[in-house]
Amino acid sequence: MLLNRVNSGGRWRIRPDGIGKVTGSLTYLTDMTAGSMLYGLVLRSEYPHASVISIQTDKAEKLPGVHAVLTYRDVPGLNAFGIAHPDQPVLCEDRVRYVGDALATVAAESIVIAQQALELIEVEYEVLGVLDDPERALHADAPLLHPKGNAMHRTTFTRGNVDEAFKQCAYIAEEIYYTPRQMHTYMETEGGLFVPEADGRLTVYSPTQHGFMDRMQLARILSVPQDHIRIISSPIGGSFGGKDELNVQPYGALLATKTGRAIKMHNSRQESVRAGLKRHPMRISMKTGVDEAGQLIAHRVSILADTGPYSTLGAEVLNFATEHVIGPYKYEHLDVEGISVFTNNGMSGEFRGFGGNQAIFALEGQMDRLAEQLGLSPWAFRKLNMRQSDDLGPFDQPIAMTEGAELVWSAIENSRLWQEQVRMKDRSAPKHSEPWIKTGIGAALTMHGAGLGVGIPDPAGGRLELAADGKIEAVFGYEEFGQGLLAALEQMLVEQFGFGASDIRMVIGDTDVVPDSGSTTASRATAMMWKSLQRMRKPFTDQLLKQASTILRCHPGELRIWEGGISLITEAQLLLTYEDLAKQTDVPIRSETSFSFPVSDTKRVGAHFMYTYSAVVVKVELNSLTGRVKVVEQQHAVAAGPVINPQGYLGQIEGGSSMALGFTLLEDAVMDKGHYMTRNLDTYLVPTIVDQQGIVEVEPIEHLPASDDYGPRGIGEVGSVTLAPAIAAAVRQASGKWVTKLPIDPAFLQEKPFFLTGE
Amino acid sequence: MSDHEGQSSTSFALHCFINGEEQTLETTAATRMLNLIRDELELTGTKRSCDIGRCGACMVLMDGIAVNACLTMAYQCAGKSITTIEGIAKNGIDPIQQAFLEEGGFQCGYCTPGMIVSVKALLESNPEPSDDEIAEALSGNICRCTGYGGIWRAVKSAIKMRGSNR
Amino acid sequence: MGMNVQETIASPQVWHPQTAAEAWHLKQSLGTDSIYVSGGTLLRTQWEAGIAAMPKHFINLSSIRGLSEIRVGESGLIIGGQVKLQACRMNTMIQRYFPMLTEALRLTAAPSIRQLATLGGNIASSIGDSLPALLGYDAEVVWFNGIEEQLILLKDWLQIARNLHPERLLLRVQLPFQQREEADGLEPGHEELVHSKTKRFYAYHKVGRREAFTPSVVTVSISGILTEARIVKDIRIALGGGQMIPIRLEQLERELIGETVDTQTIRHAYGRVVQLYEPREDIFASSAYRQTTAANVIAAELWKIAAEA
């Protein structure tokens, strides 16, 4: 059954954060100001690669209205950050490695003065050669960007003997796939307010996906104990992985500490483009072979990722890509290797899909090519080689077993669009009134891991409490960046506990108050809240009922949780409001849980345990005059366990697929010799509403094995990973051409009009 | 230069109406409306995002017409009536806002005020727009979260709601 | 205090001339430290991108009297240089008589930008997407050169646009109405018999990098009159796109007039477009892609015209 408002009935709810968003009354952290605040700006490198000879700040410091000009000399603690491996300088000392590198930061009474101060800082550079090509960065004679070399991270996974196996293959597909430097393009650029408190602590109001990680990193930079810093991190105007790493926070924190004044920072879009993370551009070479019957025998993959100047989560992204180039298929012989390389290009890092987008585009492309060589339906070919529910995971690791792959496969097989594809000939007959418009239908499938994987601390947990004012407080260390975390939490508390929405107060995004529930990434937050609530439900409701029964002088077994308070099981009548319960009891009513995201029993770092399965079929129209592709229809099937919040689920798949549409057809943060050429939204183009006029249907598959107690799987990323190969398959049908490079170059698909071909 | 040859100004007193209230703002003639609204008037529902009119996050109504506040300079607003998102719900929530709430026409919410302003401008001038007219009218408002699905549903629902309210 | 750097550093003086002569004198006396501003939308992108510095003086052209109206003149429609693009887009006279211009403006930027930007600005940029449509209607532009008004064919002005003094001021555009005897589609029943079986055709295409709100890669206008026997009686083809100053392909037009539109003619046109159109390349689209696109689109339009005839 399709996911929509009508089919969802009463489960389709208005989001708790909705009214503030539609009326503009919600204060984002970049909307905040303080009475005596100063404005912070950052001086960034003029060059993608240079030695820094000297930084002179005297003139800037003397400018009236300037309160601080800080350089590397002024970083009290570790002059570096990075979630996994801190190798990015907060303020560069002797070398800059990309155009976003920071050299100085300024606090001034106005933005104008701060800007003038930046212009007065004199930096003497010695320009160095630019390593803008990851392949070249691996050459023996390439200058080293970091002491350990330019190979930031390598991965391998092998099974059997592919060289021998290829000799046995009846058909082999060999291809090199290229994917673009996609930009998150969250609408709210980075920024926030940094407030030194009277008690000597620092409050940081700045978006992030993991408040505690920011707190740890900032404490390390400032050289203060972690509990001297309070991070307020929600609401967030979009993130998509892009705000997980620190961005302006080190500068705001340093300036606030130095000046004792509140500091406001808010990146311009150009600065956001220049300094911010992007999706790793990858070159993925694949050679895949099958036997006469179409059984996959051998699969060889080589991944080359451009990670830019510093690590952040580049290694983890490569681990993820390595797992997902294997995907939901079975091969006897496997040889996968990956390398992520330092360059002087822009920073690459975490981005929705986390390396899956690139991997799945390539892998699914191979499946289509092999099916065609075999003369099989591409969908039948997938079925033939697809994992069974009790098979091990891609890295031969134990995984939570579901029939997800089979279920999404069947949903697409039976979909209206796929049935239409089956009826179509190889290339669509020109029936359009403009016969140069060609249509095609294509589909793709994936399994996408959730959670951080083996070897990375992945804590989870939360707290429920009856507050003194009678509110049921749900406290979690997760962030709301638009995905609907609060809506999902409220819905679970209403549906699973029986509270009314107005009984609940949700507290997130404040390190002084919330438990460390881990990061809000990797499609994990909803699943972890669900699990937390499962664990707390009985203890918490038992306490509520027990205390209520004492007050009401009855047996707890006669009572139940109700909207507004406690009622009898036998009749829907409120006996005791939560407010009165809070007032009349002197026992704290509270439940807390902490656990870890479930991981696979393997030593393989990054291997996942829980997967979401998804498949999509799309219909495209190709205008062969211009080579431009329009996606006119999409049908998604997603197997992710129970639908927690129908509106949020639908929105995640629709939104993720729109991002994927941009990845496939439009988006590339073009760089030339280490400089961005697409510096704002006039040249970096994301989909508009006109690009999204096509129908998008989502069919959620809720079925899980009876023994499965892991609950909902993540859906935050999976909508963004399968569309690209499906579009490429549809383009193949429309044009006869195999797309290997994204975004699709219209010139590649352009054809001379049919009436002019042939002499 | 004769007296007829234009008035110049660096400091500039902008007389205009903001959300129905008459205002005189001491500013400069070329100051952008976006700065005046967000920083002087502290109406932060109007968002800053691209600064060059390419995203629509700062959309406001000027005499009922949707314009980008980041492109509009103070002198261009003289005597005009400016409505920000805060002004749209002045007399209670607008049916358009209600429709966005019910259909889930937003996620992170950062584009939402601008989006709603553009829908308001559209439906005030064209109460029953076609799909192509909706698409054209909203083509200057970028939403990165929703993929526009919820926005399509919200606009259609708003059209109905407004129709039945009439 | 705002967070925008470019703007707050410079706080230019804004001058509000009432006449073109005043504006011209201001520009003379303020020199390179000044700039004419209409809607200011294009200028804003240049300032923010750091391509151009914000000058110390703005000369606001929208205060000049009489430049913000659309009216019917003796020989055609007269559009003031300060008329907003969106006003042109929605104007029923333009929709009826100059539909390629309506289409060009529908595809220009987004409505909110078009509410600020002016037709004069779009033309004076010399690369605006309205230009191929205007060229297709033999538009004339009236400039003020400090002494007098000068009328010049748009196509002639575009050829010299890059070399002209920036003090020149665009007052208005004149779009001649099509001759009535040619306009059979508009006034049926009034044509002379000899022309009654002709068919007017027109199309404007913008190929960009996404479906809306996109910089152009190729812009094309093609319009003319075809007889029942599919002979080209009149044709105008104009091309632009990207940073290129649009042109009319007059040589090709002359070659096509009198020809029957068949595969051979279309093939000829295709080849000639590739030869005659010299678009500017950028990081997003090669010159070859632009040429092929233009040739394909023009060929397809001719094919459609022939098929419909």
Image (spheres, coloured by chain):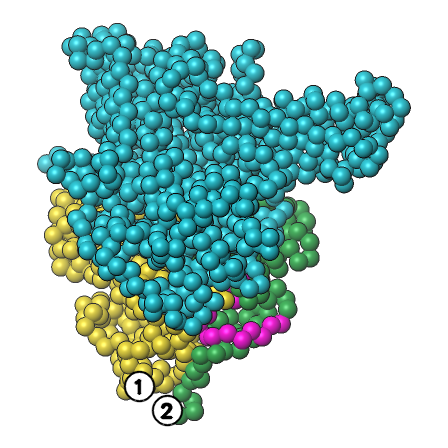
Chain colours: A cyan, B green, C yellow
Residue A592 spot, x, y in % from top left: 64, 28
Q: Residue at x 58, y 26 (%)?
A: A594
Residue B23 in magenta stretch: yes
Instruction: Residue type at mark 2: give it.
Output: Met
Do the numbered discs 2 and 1 sit on residues whose CB atoms are within 8 Å?
Answer: yes
Q: Quadrant of the C terminus of chain A?
A: top left
**Circle 1: element type:** helix
Residue A376 quadrant: top left
Q: Which residue is mark 2?
A: B1
Label 1 marks a residue whose chain is C
List the single residue furthest toward the left.
Answer: A759
Residue C231 spot, x, y in % from top left: 19, 51
Which residue occupies the foreground of this view, A618 or B164?
A: A618
Residue A650 spot, x, y in % from top left: 52, 32
Label 2 marks a residue whose chain is B
Mark 2 surroundings: few (<14), some (14-19) or many (≥20) residues within 10 A: few
Residue A280 in sight here:
yes
Q: Quadrant of the N terminus of chain A?
A: top right
Query: Is residue A12 placed above or below A158 in the rendered structure?
Result: below
Query: Is residue A640 placed above or below B48 in the rendered structure?
Result: above
* Mark-to-mark CA distance, 2 and 1: 9 Å
Query: Is residue A520 placed above or below A324 in the rendered structure?
Result: below
List the single residue furthest toward the bottom.
Answer: B2
Q: Residue at x 62, y 72 (%)?
A: B22
Query: Is residue C17 placed above or below A131 in the rendered structure?
Result: below
| Disc 2 with disc 1 on a shared chain | no
Instruction: Residue type at mark 1: give it.
Output: Ser
Which residue occupies the foreground of this view, A10 or A622?
A: A10
Q: Which residue is mark 1?
A: C29
Q: Residue at x 33, y 38 (%)?
A: A311
What range of the chain is rendered magenta? B22-38
